[in-house]
Image (cartoon, rainbow, N blue to C red):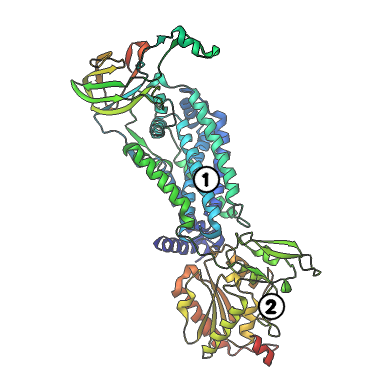
Amino acid sequence: MPSVLKFGGQAVFLAAIAVVVGYFSASPRYHQIPEGQSQIKLAIQHGGARIEDCRKLTTKELSKLPSTERRPITCSRERVALTIELSIDGKVIYADVLPPTGLSGDGVSKAYKKFLVPAGHHVIEAKLRDSKRTDGFDFDQRIEAELKQWQNLAIDFNAEQGGFLFR
Amino acid sequence: MPIRAAFDAAERLLSRIFPPHWNPLLNLGALGFFFFWIVTASGIYVYIFFDTGVTQAYSSVEYMTRDQWYAAGLMRSFHRYASDGLVLVMLLHILREFALGRYRGVRWFSWLTGIPVLLFIYVAGISGYWLVWDKLAQYVAIVSTEWLDHLPFFGQPLARNFLSPVNLESRFFTLMIFMHIAVPIVALMILWLHLQRVTRPKINPPRGLAIGTGLSLLALSLLYPAVSQGPANLAEVPGEVGLDWFYLGAYPLLENLPGPATWSASVVILLMMAGLPWLPPMRKPAVAVVNLANCNGCTRCMADCPYNAITMQVRSDGRPFEGEAVVDPSLCVACGICAGACPTSTPFRRMSELIPGIDVPGRTIASIRTATDAESAKLSGANRIMVFGCMNAGVAEQCRSGHVGVVALNCTGQLPPAFVDYVLSRKLAEGVIIAGCAENSCYNRKGTEWTTARLEGHRDPNLRDRVPRERFKAVWAGRLGAAGLRQEIEALASSVAALGPYAPRRPAKSRTAKEQSNA
């Protein structure tokens, strides 16, 4: 093959590789979420109440402990599981019991869930029980939101800030 | 194997426009290094203008892309496209080595150390996308952290950092830039390990190829600059993103398939890749053996061994030579290139038994001579051709006929050039063909290169001047296939028939009874 043709062939090949690199570096485009949808993201990280309440040690119990470990109050480690419920427009879309983490069941309970809902007006209600009670919820919050297409509504939880945080 | 056939076809095609040593498919590893250096240099320049921070990251990248498009913006695009090129050649390199079977036996070390390099390059690239903090970065950050959160190692879910705008801290970007710089450095260290058992590794592509690929990526950077995809906004889902499929091709799967399934699949794929060199266990051929009585410590075998399997050590037999060759059995693949380099591997030797200073027991130089004699005895006509064919090229055997004899070699590098002289001067054939793998594509890395250099007289042991060059040819048949090799054989057969019988200036003496017994 004449050298001019060879040189041209090399240029065409390298240009073709550059086109492949350029194209696949940002194409084809990927649709993460369909049009007309929005997302609700629930992210909970919260420790439930202790299964046993803290109590004062008796003098007899204290005397059995080494002198450096004589704290007057003792607490159990295990925590209760959280009971959580999320409903949209009156329909429950998520309900779960979240066990505490940790080998001794003394860590926080965690949940991280995503839900796609049609964009538009919605009534969103989140409930959570973190105490030893067996029915009802300790936190129950409800908001009305106008969700735009591809909007991400985050539902966080912070007991010190009053419970659920809709962001 | 279809993958090998595809690579052979692509190599054949590219060999028509590129010189053999420029062929991009034969320089994949070297091109990977070249792209790595481009990424490093352009990354250092871009880092000067980059600002870490939730809002500053995006605006600093925008400044480079819009206000300084001719310098920092160009470097940003060059950085991106060279990174993509790196992934492309890295994946092709892995696939090609797999297709050619270059991952088993002693090559397990290079294969295994290549796996973490692959992972680290991916981590480095993905962390780079994160830093821009545009919509794509947001997508990458959320999918990555959600995937990592399936592991039970993290106390606080990583994905919570990207729950809403108030959750995000600038410190995260400091961590990411540290990762983006540290991970490639670790990858480079492992690359050093990756090459430890490779003699004369090719880490720089030929200058012309480097200039060509560099310019093509630079032109791409100018004509189609890399741009951001709008600032990240955690209050919105990045509904549509332009993924870099080289780095993020698996992300839609990670996002949509259950975490345990994707983690299990990833672990299984990694374990399978790591275990490939031993699946199934390979029967190791008998390694090269040094015969001290014939070894004078000339070091040629050590210089030619492509696997660093031969070292020179202090003479152990008291003979007055500087050293002796010692073979490391764990590194030797029994390619026989050492025997081809040994000056004592001469087929003309008849007065004593043909035992070179170094030889491979599975295919000795003596057995090659015996096979040559036996093949010659079967040939007839005035256009007899003796083909010395590499078993790895695998096509020579298909060319045997009434006037074509074939002698199998472990590698063309196993053949001492004196065999060409031997065949012609002993009138065992009128022409000789050495048929090996494709140029620069030798199964044993250096066989074709050393054979070419020996035949051209650039490397010891070289072909004697008296051998008529018009009566032999080296054909790199791995790329041509059996049909192409047959054409070359017939062309030489016609040519030598036209030349008439070969009349050596010093005809070989007839064999004595002792020579016959040693043959």
**Residue at the extreme left of the image, as rendered:** A90
Q: Residue furthest right?
A: B320
**Residue name at image x 49 percent, y 49 percent:** B90
Task: Name the residue beneath numbered marker 2.
Answer: B464
Residue B37 showing in the rendered view:
no
The relative height of residue B135 versus residue B165 in the rendered view (above or below) is below
Check the image and report above or below for B220 versus B27. Answer: above
- Determine the secondary structure under disc 2: loop
Q: Secondary structure at mark 1?
A: helix
Question: Disc 1 designates what residue?
Answer: B117
Q: Taking B348 as reference, is A62 left or right?
A: left
Residue B81 in the image, given as x and y percentages of width and height: 48, 42
Residue B330 or A27: which is nearer the viewer? B330
Return the x and y of residue A76 as percentages of the image width and height. Answer: 40, 17
Point 63% across, 57% down: residue: B200
Give the class, few, some or many, for how many residues have Cα within 10 Å of label 1's Cα (few <14, many ≥20): many
Q: Amino acid at mark 1?
A: Val
Q: Position of residue A8 (x, y in %)?
A: 48, 58
Q: Chain of mark 2?
A: B
Q: Nearer the viewer, residue B184 or B458?
A: B184
User: Is B303 drawn above or below residue A124 in the view shown?
Assistant: below
Instruction: Find residue A149 and report its horizontal and vertical position in percent.
Output: 27, 26
Q: Amino acid at mark 2?
A: Arg
Could you tell which of marks 1 and 2 lies nearer the N-terminus?
1
Could you classify mark 2 by the number of other residues whose Cα lies within 10 Å: few (under 14), some (14-19), or many (20 or more)?
Answer: some
Regarding residue B217, the answer to whether it shows in the image is yes
Q: Residue B247 occupies which quadrant of the picture?
A: top left
Chain for disc number 1: B
> Mark 1, mark 2: which one is toward the viewer?
1
Q: Which mark is residue B365?
A: none
Q: Looking at the figure, which quarter contains the N terminus of chain B?
A: bottom left
